[in-house]
Image: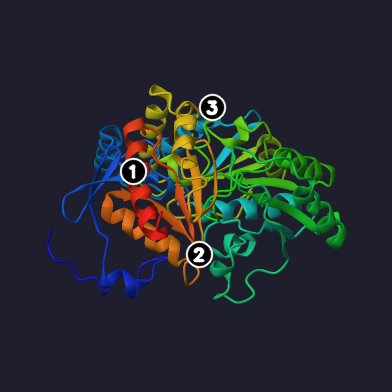
Amino acid sequence: MTELNLDAFWMPFTANRVFKAAPRIVTGAHDMYVVNERGEDVVDAMAGLWCVNLGHGRPEIADAVRDTLLHLDYAPTFQMGHPGPFRLAERLVSVLPDGFSHVFFTNSGSESVDTALKIALAYQQVCGEGSRTRLIGREKGYHGTNFGGTSVGGIMRNRQQFGPLLPGIDHLPAAVSRERFVRGFPPADPFFADELERIVSLHGPRTIAAVIVEPVVGSGGVYPPPLGYLERLREITQAHGILLVYDEVITGFGRTGTGAFAASGFGVAPDIIAMAKGITNGAIPMGAVAVRREIHDAFMAEPDGIELFHGYTYSGHPVACAAALAALDIYEREDLFARAGRMESAFQDMLFSFAGKPGVVDVRGVGLMGAIELAPQGAAGAAGMNAFVAAWNAGVMGRVTGDTLAFSPPLIVEQQHLDRIREVFEEVLAEQYDW
């Protein structure tokens, strides 16, 4: 590989000085692998960054992107249109839960969350509920890095550098089960969802516009919801006229093994769904927000004119639409929305083989997303980072959040890849914790 000058790039969510002293560079990717700077295959146990659900290097997506760039590299969607977003919105509606009828396009998960929050606030206004301006997030929640998503997010390190953020925000407690080493959904615990009733009583129901949660907490540590949790949130929000927003940026497009979206498979549908990542298999930046028909139609009841003063230069970009349509073709042709369910048992077996090992304080997961939580060693996050780096050097790319190792392999994962992931992390953790 040609020598790189690493200085000018200010890397996101990275200890820049530490990384640049000992960089980890991806130079290629194919199928279930990324390629390191030495030209060696490294098993991708994270689907890139929770997004490459179809595996790397899909020629159908590459061909669609190339053909579209040569035919229509850009077209605006402000007071104009092109075929891509209309076709893509129709396809997305066909795999969304019943009742979701319209899609608004963005360019990332962060933009999808902020768009969902703005739609929720604007919806309450057009319905004559202008006093509903408060938004409720959740501790440990990750909703991107724009101001809205950071404000409703509940990860302290993502918030503390940026002052008070948006006003009128409150947070539910993290729905973290008291039980350890639970496969799938933890036992019911009414406290976590019932706290929403306390927040409603504190602020008044007519002040709250929306509650936003991830169906499964992702970047905050991979926490599946306790049994009955989402059902209870839905019950409380409906009782008080509050919109329920799901952030399915990670859980969407087959990750949970329960269909295209957790909103379908978990049996509890919200009012608004934010999505991104797997929509294009990570090939082109894109996101979207889906809404129920009654939300869209409330805006259309206004006099003729612009109904929602919101959008992005690249909303419904032709090339992103082409990548997403090609990705949806693959999901459908290879039945990949169901594959996480078929591979769930083998994947969870791999994870739970670490239960009871020295230094492992918890294992949890659902579908093809899971986590191994490690005992701290020295500074907070040092144990997780050491394991992450050692695994990369040994041939597996995982993900680290604090002292938790996260896993979300592409949906095309096979037993041989799971065996390799287990083998590498057994070696790494055995050395780290002196098994």
**Looking at the image, which residue sits at the far front?**
435
Q: What is the distance, in whole Å, between disc 1 and disc 3 at their CAs?
A: 40 Å
The image's mark for residue 94 is: 3
Does residue 5 appear left or right of residue 318 in this picture? Answer: left
Q: Are marks 1 and 3 in contact (CB under 8 Å)?
A: no
**Among numbered discs 1 and 2, the one appearing first in the sequence:** 2
Image location of residue 201, percent across then percent down: 87, 57
Residue in front for this viewpoint, 317 or 339: 339
Q: With respect to residue 238, does 334 lie above or below? A: above
Q: What is the distance, in whole Å, between disc 1 and disc 2 at their CAs?
A: 22 Å
**Looking at the image, which residue sits at the far left?**
2
Residue in front for this viewpoint, 204 or 301: 204
Does residue 123 appear left or right of residue 94 in this picture? Answer: right
For mark 1, does the 10 Å Cα neighbourhood hold few (<14), some (14 to 19), or many (20 or more) residues? some
Q: Is residue 18 visible?
A: yes
Element marked by disc 3: helix
Residue carrying label 2? 376
Query: Type of residue at label 2?
Result: Pro
Q: Is residue 414 visible?
A: no
Image location of residue 117, percent across then percent down: 64, 54
Q: Quadrant of residue 94?
A: top right
The image's mark for residue 423 is: 1
Element marked by disc 2: loop
Query: Type of residue at label 1?
Result: Glu
Q: What is the distance, in whole Å, between disc 2 and disc 3 at their CAs?
A: 45 Å
Q: Quadrant of residue 47?
A: top left
Image location of residue 398, percent across then percent down: 38, 51
| Residue drawn at x 33%, y 60% as measured from the top left | 389
Rendered-image quadrant of the N terminus: bottom left
